[in-house]
Image (spheres, rainbow, N blue to C red):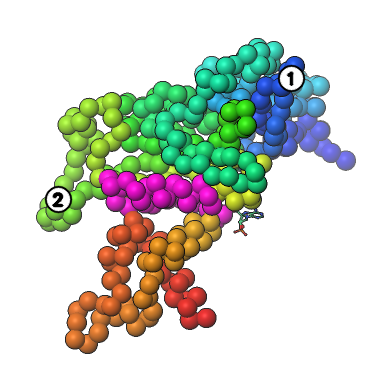
């Protein structure tokens, strides 16, 4: 039999239901529904909500711009006993929602039905398109200086907490010189009626990559962001050579396992490879699933683009009459833009594969 406390407790991951909403013939319709993977950043380690029977937390997002609408309902709420009070569910949920999140479902429905979808395109520039299972997907890139980009990112911050382990929220209201170092890549499904549904997204942070002429003169060189940025107007994305760090990468759960993660990653990397200012590509705290995906895609790419041509164990050692190995490891790594550890890992995987 459940203890009195258990009777009034609910599994936060079960009672929270997230959905994407699009316009329907007469009223809006839900196209996908899913549960969070984690809720501990909001409801604590036990991911349990105390104080209700029949609790339901419905978090709906407009599929195109992720405007959120939160509705919390319950059948019964326990009375406070001394200091022990029922959880303030909305109070906790709103910490990860934008200030102007909606709670009136009728108003939300009207907004969805009356929105002018023909005038909506994702923020920034379209840089690639692919087809999968008969549907068309577009990848858009925007800098965080772009207001529409900041709004969408702010709307979906809670998704980061629900699906990326240990993720922290990005301050979209930071100063322009800080914001312009963030790029956001949006993956959208585009329907035949030209309506957009968000499928995934990634954020990329530009760390400065100082030229070796500055970094190796034996002296410690430090610049404050203000010093560096005082030389450039705040209205443009950061113009300095950089190390691009993939910071958050998410495919929404209903779209996972169909190949989007791999295709989105490939597109993102080929875009970063084409940018002369990007000198190196790194990833912040990759999850195990992301690490697998990244290893497989990096290995496939390096095989296809000829990086591994001539690679075998002996080619890594300089021959007796020379100081340079036959396979120019460092030059290949720099050209690949991969960080030293990731490049070494790919080389090792390729050598093992060749040995077998
Ligand atoms: N049919 C069946 N299986 C397929 C198909 C298909 N058509 N296409 C791909 N797959 C398989 C792949 O082979 C792969 O299998 P594996 O797991 O055995 O290697 C698996 O599906 C996943 O590949 P994709 O579908 O390309 O990847 P997905 O779209 O699921 O994205 C990701 C992967 C990004 C990790 C996603 O699951 C996700 O967003 N997870 C939650 C958040 C997360 O962990 N993000 C990364 C955090 S790290 C960071 O942010 C820097």
- Disc 2 CB within 8 Å of nearest ligand 1 atom: no
Magenta-span inclusion, residue 265 = yes
> Relative to 80, is 114 on the left or the right?
left
Image: magenta residue range: 262-291
- Viewer-nearest residue: 256 or 93: 256
| Image side of residue 165 versus residue 75, left or right | left
Foreground disc of the pair 1, 2: 1
Which residue matches tag 2? 214
Badge 1 vs badge 2, beta-carbon distance below 8 Å: no
Upstream in sequence: badge 1 or badge 2: 1
Name the residue at 80% across, 21% down. 76
The quadrant in which residue 79 appears is top right
Kind of element beneath mark 2? helix
The secondary structure type at the circle numbered 1 is loop
Residue 102, x across and y down, in percent:
61, 17
Q: Is residue 117 above or below residue 293?
A: above
Could you tell me residue 351's position as x and y percent?
A: 44, 76
Residue occupying image coordinates x 29% and y 80%: 317
Task: Confirm whether the magenta stretch covers residue 9.
Answer: no
Residue at point 70%, 34% (across, down): 33
Q: Which mark is residue 183?
A: none
Q: Which residue is mark 1?
A: 25
Closer to the camera in the image, 165 or 347:
347
Query: Can you see residue 41?
Result: no
Q: Given the current orientation, which residue lies at the most extreme bottom position? A: 320
Q: Is disc 1's CB within 8 Å of ligand 1?
A: no
Dot 1: few (<14), some (14–19), or many (≥20) neighbours within 10 Å?
few
Q: Is residue 310 visible?
A: yes
């Amino acid at each position: 039999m459940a203890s009195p406390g258990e009777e009034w407790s609910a599994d936060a991951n079960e009672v929270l239901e997230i959905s994407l909403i699009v316009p329907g013939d007469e009223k809006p319709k839900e196209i996908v529904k899913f549960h969070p993977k984690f809720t501990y950043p909001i409801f604590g380690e036990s991911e349990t909500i105390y104080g209700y029977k029949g609790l339901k937390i419905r978090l709906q997002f407009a599929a195109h711009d992720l405007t959120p609408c939160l509705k919390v309902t319950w059948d019964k709420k326990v009375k406070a006993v001394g200091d022990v009070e029922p959880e303030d569910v909305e109070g906790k949920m709103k910490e990860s929602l934008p200030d102007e999140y909606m709670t009136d479902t009728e108003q939300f429905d009207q907004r969805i039905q009356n929105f002018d979808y023909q005038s909506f395109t994702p923020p920034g520039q379209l840089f690639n398109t692919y087809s999968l299972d008969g549907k068309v997907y577009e990848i858009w890139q925007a800098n965080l200086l772009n207001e529409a980009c900041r709004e969408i990112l702010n709307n979906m911050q809670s998704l980061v907490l629900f699906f990326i382990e240990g993720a922290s929220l990005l301050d979209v209201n930071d100063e322009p010189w800080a914001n312009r170092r963030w790029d956001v890549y949006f993956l959208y499904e585009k329907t035949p009626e030209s309506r957009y549904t968000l499928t995934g997204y990634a954020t990329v942070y530009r760390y400065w990559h100082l030229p070796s002429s500055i970094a190796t003169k034996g002296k410690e060189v430090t610049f404050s962001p203000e010093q560096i940025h005082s030389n450039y107007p705040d209205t443009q994305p950061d113009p300095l050579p950089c190390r691009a760090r993939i910071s958050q990468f998410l495919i929404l759960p209903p779209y996972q396992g169909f190949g989007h993660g791999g295709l989105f990653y490939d597109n993102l990397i080929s875009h970063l490879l084409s940018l002369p200012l990007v000198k190196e590509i790194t990833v912040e705290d990759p999850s195990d699933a992301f690490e697998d995906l990244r290893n497989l895609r990096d290995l496939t790419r390096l095989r296809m683009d000829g990086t591994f041509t001539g690679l075998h164990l002996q080619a890594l050692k300089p021959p007796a009459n020379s100081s340079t190995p036959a396979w120019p490891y460092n030059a290949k790594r720099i050209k690949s833009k991969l960080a030293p550890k990731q490049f070494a890992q790919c080389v090792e995987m390729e050598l093992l594969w060749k040995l077998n």
